[in-house]
Image (tube, rainbow, N blue to C red):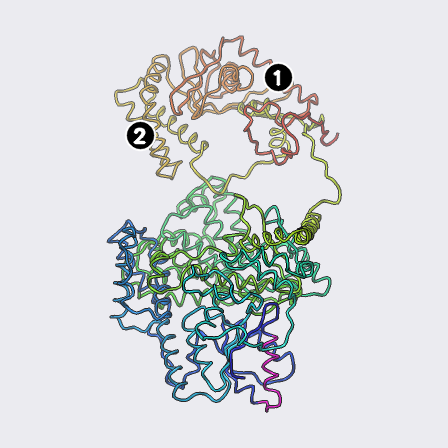
């Protein structure tokens, strides 16, 4: 059993290894299997090998461990124990990095301290793994580097010295010490039983040391996965040529480097098992396609002589989708078809967005795939609750955020959840949206409860909500990390308990248990961050980083024959159909993780791993996955933002087949045709069974029993421009729900300005005093404080007012010489008998000029032009009509001398219609009654009859199916109801 072995591309490594192990122990007693010590690289491979051994009959299992966790192999009491937990070390380094950022703010913002400390933790662990001596950093030449890298190198030197002087055994140090002690133990007392390292690519220095030691044991064996035996010896030797450029991004580089360090050749590395590769012709094709860049000239020499092109490509589908959504639909269709044929199928991709899209597509058939990666913990229900509440802490509560929080499935689970949802809906519709209310508080809730026809007393739910509205902003905005954790946990449990006495299912399910474990770890490690004050937002970032790094699997049973794997799974097992998805550059392979501490040159000089290593590992995963019986190579040619670049491996395969000649072109076209077929099939799933005709432009026609009997003066313009909106609002009684996400829009500004002008008119009813500008500004400040709770827009609008204040005061002085603003925000109604109709209005301002009056309307935007007032904007003309006919209860019937729009926007302006007088008022009366009579006689209420702008948007566009028709289409009369 002793020696170095390999398994080629295209075999199920776990199954073949298990079969080879059984064969080597054949004839020995059952306990021989239990004496074997097996070291693998992942727990997934360990479970897979256990399943493969059990599948071939009852057996004892070997002792299986991880190459990254050797402590269990040491004698009792010899295993080193780290003196600090990984998270505690990150927080300790965060404190150090925070001091660096304080002393040199140009490096990064203070909020980046935790992320920088996380990357620093990984770098220090790598330095220990690679056995880098303490003086390596001082030997890095920085003369040609920018000042940034010189500063980071200086800090790294300080950090490593600090870590050494501290003397605390780190987790990486404990692993390194475990390896040293194990190798020493094996040297003194070599184990007589078999020790096997299986499935590792030896990409890390400790693993290479372990492999060397295992090969020196009496029954030590190493089995390499996915060794390329088709590459010629000269190309193989170029991978590790010391005088060459180095090929760390090649999939076989790590195998080549290991064999070179062991002075072994591939010919001296026999097979472990006897399983046949699934597609040997394809192995040779991909091996040639992935040759190192300096050796791709071999394509010309070896490509035309490559045999079995048709066989190599027969099981390959090349799918290039127009979008990620189309790619996911096609992949799901292929997985479903394979399942229908009784085959196993797997999607392999590092793109978690694509895997979630595919899982969503499979849901149409009720298929839940076996996703090996699970779901990020920050996307679970308890994870979302923690992050959302963390982002709200220590600041005023916003309506949208509060609604999301109250509707969260874990909020109020300790109390009466159905009743809570009913109350939450009422709160949202009647208070948060109805007022509207941007920043709800206890005082606002109290006012809402008491300011109604039947005041509502506080009950358990409203008391709980009031306490919650107090508790969220009362959370410390600036506190030590440990304080943040404790107070946040208290808030979370308050949310979950509701009016009940316990937290319900908050911590009891799988995701809740994992989230609580993260919180407990953070609570235990928080003292390492010290007593330094951090913001609540920085705490939320730390919590988000910790939750996003964890995963949780859903507790229900997935389908066993449809799987979604990460790239590492390609080393462990295979399936009848393997789909390699997301094959775009920057996705597969992804970009190497940026290192903010050492650039590429500095890493090379220090003897650390180069960024190319991660690309080489991804390439090896790709080469193994592409060796399955049937494979798809899938990508999307465009994202929602830009065109994509095919993966370099796809480009190589495409280039090789294109250059081979007619045989390669035929194979490539067949691969693409198969992909196009699946794209077409997937598109058929969303295609309706029959064509649905677009909706016509609606023009409802009211029956004689239904009439427009009451409208406001502002609604008349809507009736002229968009009659359908009046139909929807007045006849169907439909009203748009105000938005939950509220901001300082034109509506809010209009309310504030109208309120301010009303306050000023009431405070200064007569001629303007000298301090009129100050009083007007004070009125605006008071109105903005009431209507606009956002400080930034308040200051901006005050600044705009200051620019027009002089012109406004001058014009107002002239108006006050003619009359006084006696009537402000007054309502009235004018009743007509033929046709029966009531016109209502709420006038902004009516000035008393003795025997006449003047009517003014404030606009925060542009005032209507004279042509608009003639044909559409009839508001002031209709108010003048109402005054002349005595429609306002407290305003005597008088003649109207003047009507005018006052624009208080970016600049002060006034607008009035031409030829205003009794004749124009009489004409307006006639036009109004003609318009109302026309609709009473059956004229259809056409949608978007005369919109003022191409960008005009109605609250009822969706109801009228606007978009299926345009403003240039003719309208279709639709009779409504009956007698």
**What residue do we see at 59% from left, 24% from top?**
719
Q: Is residue 356 magenta?
A: no
Whole-percent x, y for residue 435 in the image: 47, 39
**In this rendering, would 825 be left or right of 56?**
left
Whole-percent x, y for residue 75 in the image: 40, 86
Quadrant in the picture for the C terminus: top right
Instruction: Give me the disc on residue 778.
Output: 2
Residue bounds of the magenta highlight: 15-30
Nearest to the eye among marks 1 and 2: give it. 2
**In this rendering, would 541 be left or right of 880?**
left
Q: Can I make out residue 505 in this image?
A: no
Above-or-below relation of 793 to 575:
above
**What residue do we see at 28% from left, 56% from top?**
142
| Label 1 – label 2 distance at C-alpha | 43 Å
Residue corresponding to mark 1: 929
**In this rendering, would 408 be left or right of 95?**
right
Above-or-below relation of 376 to 50:
above
Total numbered badges shown on the rendered structure: 2
Q: Can I make out residue 684 in this image?
A: yes
Quarter of the figure with residue 334: bottom right
């Amino acid at each position: 059993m002793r020696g170095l072995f390999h398994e080629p591309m295209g075999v199920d490594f776990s199954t073949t290894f298990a079969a080879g192990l059984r064969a080597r122990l054949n004839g020995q007693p059952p306990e021989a299997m239990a004496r074997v010590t097996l070291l693998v690289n992942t727990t997934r491979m360990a479970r897979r090998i256990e399943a493969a051994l059990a599948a071939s009959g009852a057996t004892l299992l070997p002792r299986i461990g991880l190459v990254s966790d050797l402590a269990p192999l040491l004698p009792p009491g010899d295993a080193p124990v780290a003196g600090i937990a990984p998270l505690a070390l990150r927080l300790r380094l965060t404190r150090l990095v925070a001091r660096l950022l304080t002393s040199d703010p140009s490096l990064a913002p203070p909020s980046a301290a935790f992320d920088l400390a996380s990357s620093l933790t990984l770098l220090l662990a790598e330095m220990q793994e690679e056995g880098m001596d303490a003086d390596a950093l001082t030997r890095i030449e920085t003369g040609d580097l920018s000042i940034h890298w010189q500063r980071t190198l200086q800090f790294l030197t300080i950090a490593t010295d600090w870590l050494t002087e501290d003397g605390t055994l780190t987790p990486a140090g404990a692993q390194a010490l475990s390896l040293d002690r194990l190798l020493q133990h094996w040297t003194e007392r070599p184990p007589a039983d078999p020790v096997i390292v299986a499935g590792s690519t030896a990409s890390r220095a400790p693993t290479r040391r372990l492999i060397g030691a295992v090969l020196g044991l009496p029954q030590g064996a190493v089995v390499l996965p996915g060794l390329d035996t088709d590459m010629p010896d000269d190309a193989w030797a170029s991978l590790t040529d010391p005088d060459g450029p180095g090929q760390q991004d090649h999939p076989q580089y790590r195998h080549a480097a290991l064999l070179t360090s062991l002075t072994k050749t591939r010919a001296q590395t026999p097979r472990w098992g006897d399983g046949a590769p699934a597609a040997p012709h394809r192995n040779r094709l991909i091996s040639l396609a992935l040759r190192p860049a300096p050796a791709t000239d071999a394509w010309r020499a070896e490509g035309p002589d490559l045999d079995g092109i048709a066989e190599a490509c027969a099981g390959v589908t090349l799918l290039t989708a127009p979008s990620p959504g189309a790619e996911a639909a096609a992949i799901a269709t292929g997985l479903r078809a394979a399942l229908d044929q009784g085959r196993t199928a797997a999607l392999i991709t590092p793109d978690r967005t694509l895997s979630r899209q595919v899982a969503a597509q499979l849901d149409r058939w009720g298929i839940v795939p076996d996703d090996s990666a699970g779901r990020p913990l920050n996307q679970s229900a308890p994870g979302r609750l923690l992050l959302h509440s963390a982002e709200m802490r220590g600041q005023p509560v916003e309506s949208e955020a509060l609604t999301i929080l109250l509707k969260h499935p874990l909020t109020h689970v300790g109390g009466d959840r159905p009743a809570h949802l009913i109350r939450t809906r009422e709160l949202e519709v009647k208070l948060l949206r109805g007022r509207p209310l941007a920043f709800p508080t206890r005082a606002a809730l109290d006012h809402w409860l008491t300011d109604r026809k039947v005041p509502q007393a506080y009950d358990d739910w409203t008391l709980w909500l009031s306490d919650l509205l107090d508790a969220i902003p009362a959370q410390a905005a600036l506190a030590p990390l440990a304080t943040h954790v404790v107070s946040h946990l208290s808030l979370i449990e308050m949310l979950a308990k509701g009016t009940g006495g316990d937290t319900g299912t908050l911590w009891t399910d799988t995701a809740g248990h994992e989230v609580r474990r993260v919180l407990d770890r953070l609570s235990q490690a928080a003292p390492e961050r010290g007593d330094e004050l951090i913001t609540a937002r920085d705490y939320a970032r730390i919590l988000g980083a910790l939750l996003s790094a964890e995963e949780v699997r859903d507790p229900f049973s997935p389908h066993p024959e449809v799987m979604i794997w990460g790239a590492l799974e390609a080393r462990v097992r295979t399936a009848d159909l393997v789909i390699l998805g997301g094959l775009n550059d920057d996705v597969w392979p992804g970009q190497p993780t940026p290192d903010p501490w050492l650039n590429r040159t500095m890493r090379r000089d220090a003897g650390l791993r180069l960024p190319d290593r991660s690309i080489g590992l991804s390439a090896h995963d790709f080469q193994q996955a592409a060796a399955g019986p049937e494979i798809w190579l899938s990508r999307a040619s465009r994202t929602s933002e830009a065109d994509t670049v095919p993966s370099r491996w796809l480009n190589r395969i495409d280039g090789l087949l294109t250059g081979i000649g007619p045989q390669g072109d035929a194979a490539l076209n067949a691969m693409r045709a198969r992909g196009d077929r699946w794209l077409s099939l997937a598109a058929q799933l969303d295609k309706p069974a029959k064509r649905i005709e677009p909706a016509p432009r609606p023009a409802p026609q009211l029956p004689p029993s239904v009439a427009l009997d009451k409208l406001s003066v502002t609604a008349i313009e809507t009736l002229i421009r968009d009659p359908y909106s009046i139909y929807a609002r007045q006849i169907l009684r439909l009203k748009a729900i105000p938005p939950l996400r509220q901001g300082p829009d034109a509506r809010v500004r209009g309310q504030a300005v109208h309120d301010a002008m009303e306050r000023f008119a009431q405070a200064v009813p007569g001629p303007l005093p000298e301090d009129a500008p100050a009083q007007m500004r004070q009125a605006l400040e008071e109105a903005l404080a009431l209507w606009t709770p956002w400080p930034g827009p308040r200051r901006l609008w005050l600044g705009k007012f200051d620019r027009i204040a002089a012109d406004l005061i001058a014009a107002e002085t002239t108006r006050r010489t003619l009359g006084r603003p006696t009537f402000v925000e007054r309502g009235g109604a004018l009743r007509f008998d033929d046709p029966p109709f009531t016109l209502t209005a709420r006038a902004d301002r009516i000035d008393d000029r003795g025997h006449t009056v003047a009517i003014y309307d404030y606009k925060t935007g542009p005032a209507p032009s004279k042509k608009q007032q003639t044909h559409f904007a009839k508001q002031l003309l209709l108010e003048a009509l109402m005054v002349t006919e005595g429609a306002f209860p407290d305003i005597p019937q008088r003649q109207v001398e003047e009507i005018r729009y006052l624009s208080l926007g970016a600049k002060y302006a006034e607008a009035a219609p031409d030829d205003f007088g009794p004749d124009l008022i009489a004409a307006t009366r006639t036009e109004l009654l003609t318009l109302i009579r026309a609709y009473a006689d059956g004229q259809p209420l056409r949608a978007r009859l005369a919109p003022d702008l191409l960008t005009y948007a109605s609250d009822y566009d969706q109801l009228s199916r606007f978009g299926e028709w345009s403003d240039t289409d003719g309208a279709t009369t639709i009779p409504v109801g009956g007698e």
